[in-house]
């Protein structure tokens, strides 16, 4: 039977990871900024790295649903590969994007949680304050993700998805090298 990750499990996992990152960074008794629900706008701490947040969130979700991270289905995609056309309701997905060498500063690691026809992007972004949670229709996210993955109008797609506009780049550059997609479902 497929695993369905619930909204409450996602919120609890996000907040546990935010509290842990905050404690490591601050080293004091100050209170971490938490996400009250997935529809609330909460800005990320620009000192948090996506390469800590996203995998830690994946591990936390796995712990809550009693799934071993090592047993998850992971696939690597290169530009031109056929990406999933949709995700099942309740799926939790980690996507780690590796850009080409000259654009490696745009590498990003993020998560998606699917609820019906909605896809919730869950992220932090080093040196930028971005919405921790951003809702898309699943169709819109898949279309933008395909543009990004296939280097089609990737600059706009990157900005729309992540809320960070690539600057000082040539839009004709090839962005995507490969990406690893791991699904809890």
Image (tube, helix red, strand yellow):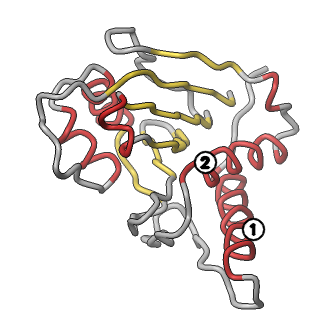
In front here: 107 or 118? 107
Image location of residue 132, percent across then percent down: 48, 62
In front here: 13 or 24? 24
Q: Quadrant of the N terminus?
A: top right
Q: Pointer 2: what residue?
A: 54
Q: Residue at x 47, y 15 (%)?
A: 77
Q: Residue at x 74, y 24 (%)?
A: 72
Q: Quadrant of the C terminus?
A: top right
* Mark 2 crowd level (few <14, some 14–19, many ≥20, 10 Å Cα): many
SS class, disc 2: helix
Q: Residue at x 64, y 52 (%)?
A: 52
**Residue with the most extreme bottom position:** 29
Q: Residue at x 35, y 28 (%)?
A: 100
Question: Is 108 left, or right, of 137 in this rendering?
Answer: right
Question: Is 168 left, or right, of 48 in this rendering?
Answer: left
Question: Is 148 left, or right, of 99 in this rendering?
Answer: left
Q: Pointer 1: what residue?
A: 20
């Amino acid at each position: 039977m497929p695993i369905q990750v619930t909204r409450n499990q996602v919120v609890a996992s996000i907040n546990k990871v935010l509290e842990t990152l905050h404690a490591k960074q601050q080293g004091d008794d100050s209170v971490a900024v938490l996400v009250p629900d997935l529809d609330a706008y909460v800005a990320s701490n620009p000192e948090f790295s996506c390469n800590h947040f996203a995998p830690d969130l994946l591990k936390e979700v796995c712990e809550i649903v009693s799934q071993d991270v090592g047993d998850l289905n992971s696939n690597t995609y290169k530009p031109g590969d056929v990406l999933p056309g949709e995700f099942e309701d309740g799926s939790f997905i980690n996507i780690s994007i590796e850009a080409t060498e000259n654009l490696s500063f745009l590498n990003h690691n993020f998560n998606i949680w699917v609820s019906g026809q909605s896809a919730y992007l869950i992220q932090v972004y080093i040196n930028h304050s971005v919405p921790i949670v951003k809702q898309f229709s699943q169709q819109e996210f898949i279309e933008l993700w395909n543009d990004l993955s296939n280097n089609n109008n990737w600059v706009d797609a990157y900005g729309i998805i992540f809320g960070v506009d690539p600057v000082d780049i040539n839009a004709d550059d090839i962005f995507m090298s490969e990406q690893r997609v791991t699904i809890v479902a």
